[in-house]
Amino acid sequence: MTARITRGSTAADAMIHFPKICGPATTVAQVRELFRDDHLHAVLVADAGELVSIVERPDISAAPPNAPARRSGRLRERTTGPDADLEATRRAMIARRRRRLAVIDDHGTLLGLLCLNRTGLGFCSDADVRARAGERRGHAARALD
């Protein structure tokens, strides 16, 4: 159930409300392990609710495994505000070849995550994330049989 873009829609209307978050002590090795999931495009690093870094695959290509992952990532050009116009944001994401943007408030508090779908026509919803998680659990259970 992809989040639909309608006139006047904002980033807050389409964001995933409970994205996966890593703590500030997360290492580069741990992020590399997370990136084994090809659905994962960005790792959000937060400290007490404040977004401190967004790490993408290229950020950690040369980083030592035990280094804090937060030092490899950045926030610039990887965040948007909750009131950002959704269609303008979608177009900008496509132009910058960006599939994920964290949604933060004026104080840097992480509110959610915009996940542009593969077609670029819409955004993944909370229901999409739950369904994918259910599929992964089902695959894992079948592998144990």
Image: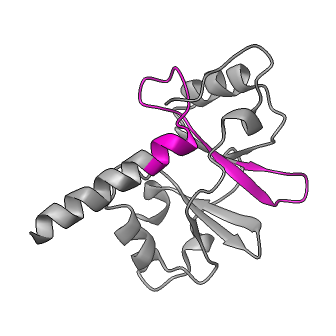
Q: Is residue 63 visible?
A: no
The quarter holding residue 82 reads top right
Residue drawn 54% across and 79% down? Answer: 26
Q: Position of residue 109 (x, y in %)?
A: 81, 61
Q: Is residue 99 visible?
A: yes
Q: Is residue 36 above or below residue 97?
A: below
Residue drawn 45% across and 86% down? Answer: 66
Q: Residue furthest left?
A: 145
Q: Nearer the viewer, residue 145 or 49?
A: 145
Q: Nearer the viewer, residue 141 or 66?
A: 141
Q: Position of residue 53 (x, y in %)?
A: 66, 64
Residue drawn 69% across and 20% down? Answer: 87
Q: Quadrant of the C terminus?
A: bottom left
Q: Is residue 57 above or below residue 69?
A: above
Q: Is residue 118 covered in magenta? A: yes
Q: Is residue 112 covered in magenta? A: yes
Range shown magenta: 103-130
Q: Position of residue 103 (x, y in %)?
A: 73, 47
